[in-house]
Amino acid sequence: MGITVSLHSELREALGEKYVLVEPEDVIVYERDGSIIQVMPEVVALPADTAQVAAVVRAAKRANVPIVPRGSGTGLAGGAVPAEGGVVVSLARMNRILEVDPRNRTALLEAGVINLDVTKAAASHGLFYAPDPSSQAACSIGGNVANNSGGPHTLAYGVTTNHVLGVEVVLDDGQVVWLGGAVPDTPGYDLCGVFVGSEGTVGIVTKALVRLMRTREAVQTLLAVFDRMDAATQSVVEITGRGIIPAALEMMDKVTIEAVEMGSSLGYPKGAEAVLLVEVEGVREHCDRAVALVREICEQTGARQVKVAQDAAERQRLWKGRKEAFGSMGRLAPHYYVQDGVVPRSRLPEIMREVAAISTRFGLRIANVFHAGDGNLHPNILFDMRTPGELDRVIEASDAILRACVAAGGSITGEHGVGLEKRNSITLLFSQQDLDAMAKVRKAFDPDGRFNPAKVFPTPITCAEMRLVPAKIPAGLWI
């Protein structure tokens, strides 16, 4: 059964007519997330609270239609795209920070709260929220939970699952339950852990209780400049091999530097083959020792320059370039396709040589900006979708990169999730028996398979086929 007039009426009764979108000119803005996959929604619901989310879920269940949870739409694997139609449930209106508890160092948040706003709210208490994706200023906590998002500071603090204590969720039948608790490691099965990283396939997270961290006494940021990518990647191996765990250890290559500096001068040398952005924090004495040791290692491995940010303003300029790197790609090409394969740190030098070889083999320019400290690559394949055959080459090159990562002992994703994009690549990591076990867990929560269908698990339809179906833009609509 598809979307019916009666379902529209039921949704409008629950949410109000203003918050149920059905006209093409309204729903077209929900046709895609941060990936290049696009599918026009049939209807978009914008609930204001958990009770309204539950009402939408019950109505969709009665109509036997899919439910696609959506946060801020910054995901990079097609996870928020309505692959099989149904109701897109946007949680953007649920953006309230319900409580910041400095004594217990926790924050209670609705799913639509923007990541960066959590740290802003906690700052006056000397606290911060550690997971900080590059889309931190736009991405939502619910989306972070769904994809178990990371960010530059993952190396020291871990990913989202390490900071979520409990979640409020709406189940398949509209029932609302809390999983987890106010303290880590509550007794019983870790059902909260099942939801973190489940990509919207087992229910909808409507609230999260997250752990806050105490702001560090001292923070220092270094920029190391290299004329050879091999030297830069070897520095990463040496830094972590010496037992130094920076708060962040990021890398940007020549193409990325070019894109960033085209927009504004932020202090990255345009002629460099690669730069390392290293941040250390903790007590002041530790920072001073760590900075000296990192500088020594980088110089020994071939850095032509190592400079330390002299104040907070300079630190912010350096991080501004890193955080805006993805958005800068539009200065170099109309489209880009980003991956997030993972490799052991010790294999970084060889995998970057392989990415360069793939770039040459497929005749595509690739810009690399990534979390070097934990081996999480972000190769951005630059292209023009209007050029016949170019999208096919992009997808083939992307697949080659993921296969190389797995062959090096890594994974197909570190933080972006599987979504639509990598659902057929998941067999590179897991056997059919593994996938069957995962499917049983999913079925226990979603017996009808209506939560975010066609995501995570392999299907006969390829991602390439779905990407090639353009949205139908209504006549007279200017975009």
Image (cartoon, rainbow, N blue to C red):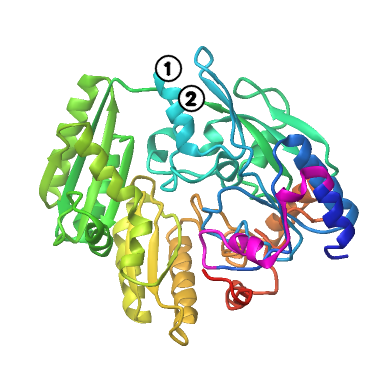
Q: Quadrant of residue 393?
A: bottom left
Bin the neighbour count of mark 1 within 10 Å (Cα to Cα): few under 14, some 14-19, many 20 and up.
some
The secondary element bearing badge 2 is classed as loop
Q: Which one is in front, 231 or 206?
A: 206
Q: CA distance from mark 1 to mark 2?
A: 10 Å
Q: Please report the bounds of the magenta region as a residue range.
A: 13-36
The residue beneath circle 2 is 212
Q: Measured along the vertical axis of the image, is residue 348 above or below residue 239?
A: below
473 in magenta:
no
Q: Which one is in front, 95 or 159?
A: 95
> Residue at image x 77%, y 44%?
15
24 in magenta:
yes
- Give left or right: position of 206 versus 358: right
Q: Measured along the vertical axis of the image, is residue 154 above or below residue 256?
A: above
Q: Quadrant of residue 354?
A: bottom left
Say whether marks 1 and 2 touch (CB < 8 Å): yes
**x and y percent of residue 32 in the render?**
58, 62
- Give left or right: position of 62 versus 37: right
As drawn, which residue projects farthest toward the bottom?
Answer: 388
- Give left or right: position of 51 versus 244: right
The residue beneath circle 1 is 125
**x and y percent of residue 203 in the render?**
74, 45
Amino acid beneath label 2: Leu
